[in-house]
Amino acid sequence: MTARQWSRPSAVLCGLGTYLPPRIVTNDELSLELDTTDEWIRNRTGIRRRHVIEPGSATSTLAIEAGRRALKSSRHDRADAVVVATTTPDRPCPATAPEVAAQLGLPGVPAFDIGAVCAGFVYALAIGAGLISSGIAERVLVIGADTFSTILNPKDRTTRAIFGDGAGAVVLRPGEAGEPGALGPFDLGTDGDLADLITVPAGGSRQRAEGTTAPPADHYFTMQGKSVFQQAVLRMTESVQRVLAQTGWSVDDIDRFVGHQANARILTALAERLELPRERIVSNIDRVGNTAAASIPLALADGGLRPGHRVLLTSFGGGLAWGSTVLRWPEVTPA
Ligand code: UT7
């Protein structure tokens, strides 16, 4: 057993990269196809536009570019494990991560997907931190990538108004618990009794085992928006309080609050409940919409973070699943 294994290194964030597909869809463009308006979408969600992939691209296209940029930002072109958080893998089987690793010139490394829907990135960070503290990997590339445009019902104005495509990635290395960039503690949780609030009903083993042909609408993403909104505010508030208690920080200690960008009104409600000044809340939802597993790293890159800032990350999504963690922002330039 080496000294490094005995002392259980912390995982330290040392690189950040993001990628958005070039095509932008404005609210006005959506209103040409759907019974909606720019005004409704802006007032109810804070979103003005979102990016979407075009034919020929897939989740891996975005994940590879974000991963490449994160490695560049870390000034080290190697990682020895790749974790991809996604709900929209290129194919149901195999996982997307091995192809991403191969395309990034990382042959032979452990690479796998994890599914925690919009909470996926924080879950993937926790797994990356575990790989490092257990001594299994030295440098881990953690990617959140989703292309919800591929699973939305074209006729569903509610989901099409909020979701966008994108990817973000970070590189983790071993280090000391107190140093800038060190992650943790983590608060993670789920409530499977409420799994039906956010679901793609068809296409999985349940439907196949029953031998039924699912109606086409069941292959699309569905969300019970109002209940999900309430759960998002409740679960993220509780998770933030738990992670603060573990960390020993008070709400006043948070310099930047990076919450899942699902709806600007959810971020406002969180700020009110936690009594957090609005200017500490990072929000880029007006430009990117809700990018699911990519939401947190995209917000990190857009958040105007400065070295030394105390940053709290919190996320929430289908499962239901939620997760929070903290770090002091390191000297990292997003790529
Ligand atoms: O990322 C994972 C977690 N996801 C979330 O956290 C999302 C949480 N939920 C939300 O952000 C909001 O619930 C939505 C943005 C999805 C919906 O906003 P809402 O204010 O909760 O609207 P609603 O579902 O209560 O609908 C109010 C009205 C309805 O019309 P009626 O029945 O009152 O006549 C909807 O049909 O607004 C209508 N509506 C729309 N109208 C114009 C719903 N979507 C639209 C739309 N344009 N795009």
Image: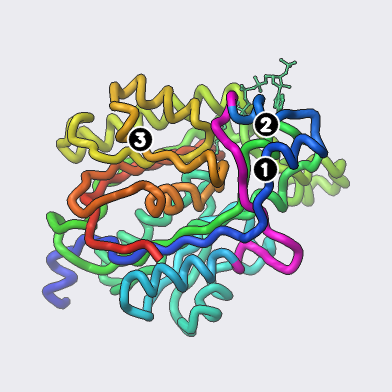
Magenta span contains residue 48: yes
Image coords of residue 139 (percent x, y):
32, 72
Q: Is residue 122 visible?
A: no
Does ligand 1 reach within 8 Å of label 2's beta carbon? no
Residue to which mark 3 is pinned: 281
Amino acid type of the residue tagged 1 in the rendering: Thr
Please name the residue that numbered disc 2 is placed on. Answer: 38
Identify the magenta region.
43-61
Q: Is mark 1 within 8 Å of ligand 1?
A: no
Marks 1 and 2 in Cβ contact (< 8 Å):
yes
Alpha carbons under labels 3 and 2: distance apart: 24 Å
Upstream in sequence: badge 1 or badge 2: 1
Question: Which dot, 3 or 2, sits closer to the camera?
Answer: 2
Q: Which quadrant would residue 180 be assigned to in this image?
A: bottom left
Image quarter (top left, top right, bottom left or bottom right) of the N terminus: bottom left
- Could you say whether the residue bearing mark 3 is in a helix, strand or loop? loop
Identify the disc placed on residue 113. Answer: none
